[in-house]
Amino acid sequence: MSNHFDRFKTAIESRLRGPAFSGVLQRLNIDPKRYWLLMDLFHKLSTREEMQGQLGRQTRILRFSAIFSAAMSGVAALVFILIQGTPFALASVSLGLTIFTLVAVLLSEAANSLVNPDEALALAHQPINGATYTGAKLSHLLNIVLHYVLGWNLLPALATPLLKDGRWFHPALHLLVAFTLGLVLALFCCSIFGLVMRVVPARRMKSAAQFIQAIPGVLIAFVQFSPRGTVKRLFGVVLTVYAPLENVPKWLLGFVLATVAIAITVVGIRSLSGDYLIRVSSMVHGRANAATRVRRSLLGEIIRKAFGGQAGRAGFDYVKRMMLRDWQFRRQLLGILPMIFFMALGVVSAGMASPLSSGFTSSHFVPHLLGFILTIVCAALPYGTDYKAVWLFLLASDRALARFAQGIHASLWLAFTIIPNLLLFPLFAWRWGIADAATFAMYSAAASSVYLAVGLSWMEGIPFGKQLGPRQIQGNQGFARMIVFIIVSLVAVGLQYLLFRNVLAVWIATPLIALAAVALTRKSLHAFHAAMVYQLGLTTQMSTLIYKEVGAETLD
């Protein structure tokens, strides 16, 4: 089966490299020769797993996603056949799922391709115009469109003749509409970043791109976690505002909307083909005048004295700055931040009665929500964009690396344990009283410190020092750990509910949990330090694959 697929793929590619398609590329101001050179280069980088996070170039993951989509759409098609639905209703469902999937995926993929093009730094001095590079860079989006359109629409299209009022030509019509819609969405998502480049400085494009990527996740989380009836009320407001449009003919309204969408898409795509390569360096490196002033802060002095001296402070500042700057880390957390925000909003809006009261309250979930955030952060922290710079840590001694690990722990502990509990303390004191708030805050800090110790032991190497490749995305280890975390946290919530029925039991349990957190943290820091040393050892061994030491006898 794979041999037939490879032959089919080779035949299509040979046709595309012919004079007919080359003429189309030339009319789009794309140099065909350099376009195919770039395509071959990107393919080689993809096979070597150098193209980070680009779904269109990770064939195995993309095929799995398409097969999953095909299975889901096949179930929907079978249901419509059993209930004898109409082809229009089935097409609406499959096309709606296609739009939902493509918008979420293509926005992220276009941003990762256009706003963080690391390989373009080596090509900026080459005689390649912006249209050629942009066309080659975004060609992998067509691969995404092809897989998801077929995944969500192939089986429903084949099922349409079996439905009520189905016709023999409906499958071809369904697939034609689906492919047209997917292509338009791909061009529209790319044009968004072209328009943003017109108004946003190149050095701020990373922040703007990640804000755009967050929009679908925010909307999904808002629909899922907002109070009941909120979405319905918003739709009512929208219908009220646009009520005068009911008198406008539907064909005229559709023509105007289509014209505006096409105009926006064309202007955005043309913006990408201008001086795109000139702005690449500024986009990749970000602001040159970032806030890196040398200053003596009180917090830095506290970290230096309490967490391993100057090396500990270096680890503290390193993680703090890189979490705000690293593209891959921010991109990984971007998908879960809306969910975490609305989950926290749901916990707060559920009443937040005192956990020392007689009943079960949403406040029991607070320490474990912080633990969930810490687990996600620790799982994402080892991977980053500038992983090749990990050789710099070879200059540090083994003792300095141990203290460096202490500083990393201090940064995570302050950012995700101490500060959240301090921010929540005034709210708890206002709702429950100072005594209950202080008791719960100390317990929450101790419990979330245990989660941090466990998450720290999972970090396999120097933070931001590894490449996030397909093996990490496909691996089952992170999924298994998340299942274990959910089970353990639910058991802990139940035990916590029993514990908080007696204030004296909480006072006794809190210092015991804190002592357990200290013991676990020591073991985790030792394991984390060993993982960093092991990664640096692998880095030194890899250099022997490239270079060979020449002895004196060889020179003679």
Image: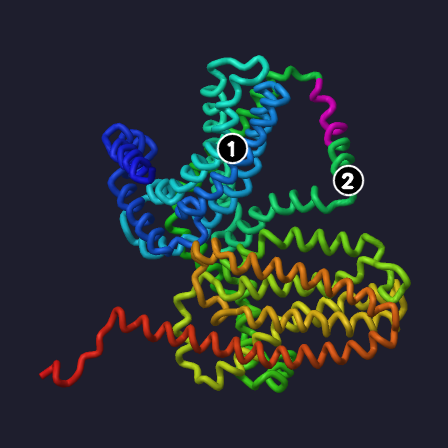
Question: What residue appears at the point 40 percent right and 42 percent down from the top-left corner?
Answer: 140
Can you say whether 282 is above or below 304 in the image? above
Q: Residues within 10 Å of mark 1 (few under 14, many from 20)?
A: many
In the depicted view, which residue is nearer to us: 499 or 42? 499
Identify residue type, mark 1: Trp
Please give the label number shown on residue 230.
2
- Judge whether residue 239 is colored magenta: yes
Q: Nearer the viewer, mark 1 or mark 2?
A: 1
**For the residue labelled by badge 1, is the local secondary structure a helix, a strand or a loop?**
helix
Q: Which residue is mark 1?
A: 152
In the depicted view, which residue is nearer to us: 463 or 82? 82
Please give the label number shown on residue 344.
none
Question: What residue appears at the point 33 percent right and 49 percent down from the top-left corner?
Answer: 42
Question: What residue appears at the point 50 percent right and 39 percent down from the top-left corner?
Answer: 189
Q: Residues within 10 Å of mark 2 (few under 14, many from 20)?
A: few
Q: Is residue 366 left or right of residue 556?
A: right
Residue 486: percent from the left, percent from the top? 66, 59
Which contiguous range is marked in magenta?
A: 238-246
| Magenta span: chief secondary structure | helix
Q: Residue furthest left?
A: 556
Q: Residue furthest front?
A: 82
- Judge whether residue 462 is colored magenta: no
Question: What residue appears at the point 58 percent right and 50 percent down from the top-left corner?
Answer: 211
Q: Is residue 104 left or right of residue 443?
A: left
Q: CA distance from mark 1 to mark 2?
A: 30 Å
Q: Is residue 386 left or right of residue 522?
A: left
